[in-house]
Image (tube, helix red, strand yellow):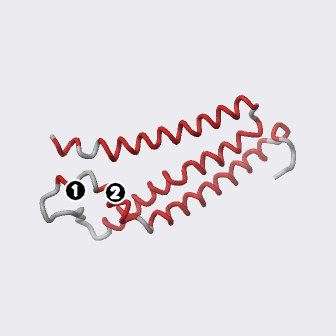
Amino acid sequence: MSAALPSEQTITDHLGELRIRLIWVAWILFGGFGACYGFSEKIFDFIRAPILPYLPVGDKGLHFSGVFEKFMAHVKVSFLAGVILTSPFGFIKFGNLLLPVCTLKKSAMLLVLFFLELFFLLVALHLLIGLSSPLPLNF
């Protein structure tokens, strides 16, 4: 891209930089998916942990009716875990896109928003997995 200041770039220069950052985020996401796919059975054990006490004795697994359902379940869980794992890096990439045009006060606001996003993501995961899974089973 051009070496001009961010305020002097044309719209095509900005779109080119956005395209490069989107490609980086896609590669980061693909790497996170690959890393999480190797641990997909352990991730499934973590997800299954809240319902294990409520399953019948001797039945400690999930049942899949189709041929590819187990594989697709592992792919979906790995993809979602990869999104969760790599989301801070994606937000940093997009934050760096906005950083050159921001003042010092707005840059500090971006940093605060990044940590708030991370906090709310962790709270949502805790509520989703830790608290809401056993509730229907106690009904």
Q: Is residue 89 left or right of residue 48?
A: right
Q: Farthest residue to the bottom: give it.
A: 67
Q: Residue at horizontal 23%, vertical 45%?
A: 134
Q: Residue at horizontal 34%, vertical 57%?
A: 46
Q: Which three-letter amino acid code belongs to the residue tagged 2?
A: Phe
Sequence-wise, which precedes: disc 1 or disc 2? 2
The vertical placement of 94 against 52, above or below, is above
The vertical placement of 36 against 87, above or below, is below
The vertical placement of 49 against 117, above or below, is below
Give x and y (percent) for residue 2. 85, 50
Q: How many marks?
A: 2
Classify mark 2: helix, strand or loop: helix
Q: Residue at horizontal 45%, vertical 55%?
A: 81
Q: Which three-letter amino acid code belongs to the residue tagged 1?
A: Leu
Residue at label 1? 52
Classify mark 1: helix, strand or loop: helix
Give x and y (percent) for residue 26. 59, 57
Q: Farthest residue to the left: give it.
A: 57
The vertical placement of 82 against 135, above or below, is below
Q: Which mark is residue 46?
A: 2
Q: Nearer the viewer, residue 4 or 93?
A: 93
Q: Nearer the viewer, residue 73 or 44?
A: 44
